[in-house]
């Protein structure tokens, strides 16, 4: 909105020069605002944009992927009901302490037990929804390592030593999947890892493949038909 001011003035002329008592017109144009009202408010338009997953900070997106992983446990279908099913069990572990521990240290350890997630018996066995991984390439590369870094992969003695199952599984992984593997529980037969055993070379190859990424390994060695250490 522009404001116009009209005034009568005489620039070296008498007021009655033009007759009727009117002199020449001097027009002064003064703006009442620095910015015209017709310019849109881009700040308000930017704030009204819809908030999407990729607009969230990376830390929040990783938390979302983590909870989606925990909400998607793997449930194995029993394709052959007449086959023996491995018994599900947990290895409850505790740290080994030397016998020569002072009384003060033992009391402190009882009052404030140290917890670690390295050998936790409650590690998940879950996956990620396929729809999430297929959303776009950015989401895929951000979330694809979670099942390998968080799950505990279990290989038990079932018709054969768990060593062979672990070796076949690890060999089939892509290099980036093998490098992201963190936690493994393995059952082996004693004869597989002794000198001259049938699986000794397989065991050495498996250790080489796991050395780069695996951080927690719980191993059960079966000595006979029913005993183990």
Image: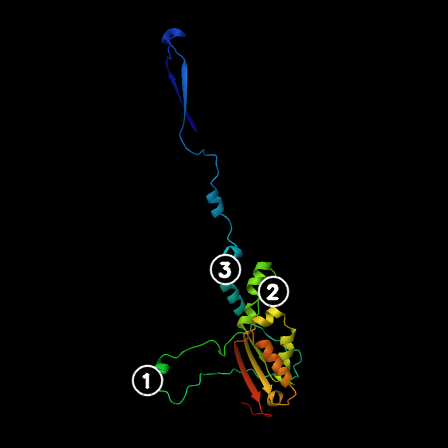
Q: Nearer the viewer, residue 4 or 144?
A: 144
Q: Position of residue 118 (x, y in %)?
A: 48, 77
Crowd tier of the residue under label 1, counting other residues whose Cα lies within 10 Å: few below 14, some 14–19, many 20 or above: few
Whether the residues at callouts 1 and 3 have beta carbons within 8 Å, the answer is no
Answer few, some or many: residues within 10 Å of disc 2's Cα (few below 14, many 20 plus, some between 14 and 19): few
The residue depicted at 60 percent of the width and 72 percent of the height is 178
Residue beneath disc 3 = 58
| Disc 3 element | helix
- Few, some or many C-alpha atoms within 10 Å of disc 3 (few <14, some 14-19, many ≥20)? few
Q: Secondary structure at mark 2?
A: helix
Q: Which numbered dot is residue 104?
A: 1
Label 2 and label 3: CA atoms lie apart by 20 Å
Which residue is labeled 2 in the image? 130
Query: Front-most of 158 and 195?
Result: 195
Residue 78 falls in image quadrant: bottom right
| Vertical position of residue 88 compared to residue 15: above or below | below
Q: Earlier in the sequence, mark 1 or mark 3?
A: 3
Residue at the image position 57 percent from the left and 87 percent from the top: 221
Q: Quick one: SS at disc 1?
A: helix
């Amino acid at each position: 909105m522009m404001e116009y001011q009209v005034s009568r003035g005489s620039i070296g002329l008498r007021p009655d020069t033009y007759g009727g008592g009117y002199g020449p017109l001097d027009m002064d144009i003064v703006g009442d605002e620095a910015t015209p009202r017709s310019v849109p408010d881009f700040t308000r338009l930017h704030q009204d944009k819809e908030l999407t997953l990729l607009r969230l900070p990376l830390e929040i997106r990783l938390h979302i992927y983590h909870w989606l992983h925990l909400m998607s446990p793997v449930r194995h279908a029993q394709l052959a009901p007449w086959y023996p099913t491995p018994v599900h069990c947990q290895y409850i572990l505790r740290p080994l302490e030397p016998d020569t521990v002072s009384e003060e240290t033992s009391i402190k350890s009882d009052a404030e037990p140290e917890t670690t997630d390295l050998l936790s018996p409650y590690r998940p066995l879950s996956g990620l929804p396929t729809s999430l991984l297929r959303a776009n390439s950015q989401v895929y590369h951000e979330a694809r390592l979670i099942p390998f870094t968080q799950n505990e992969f279990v290989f038990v003695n079932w018709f054969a030593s768990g060593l062979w199952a672990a070796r076949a599984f690890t060999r089939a992984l892509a290099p980036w999947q093998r490098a992201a593997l963190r936690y493994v529980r393995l059952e082996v037969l004693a004869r597989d890892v002794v000198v001259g055993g049938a699986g000794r070379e397989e065991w050495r190859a498996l250790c080489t493949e796991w050395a780069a990424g695996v951080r927690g390994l719980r191993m059960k060695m079966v000595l006979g038909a029913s005993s183990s250490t």
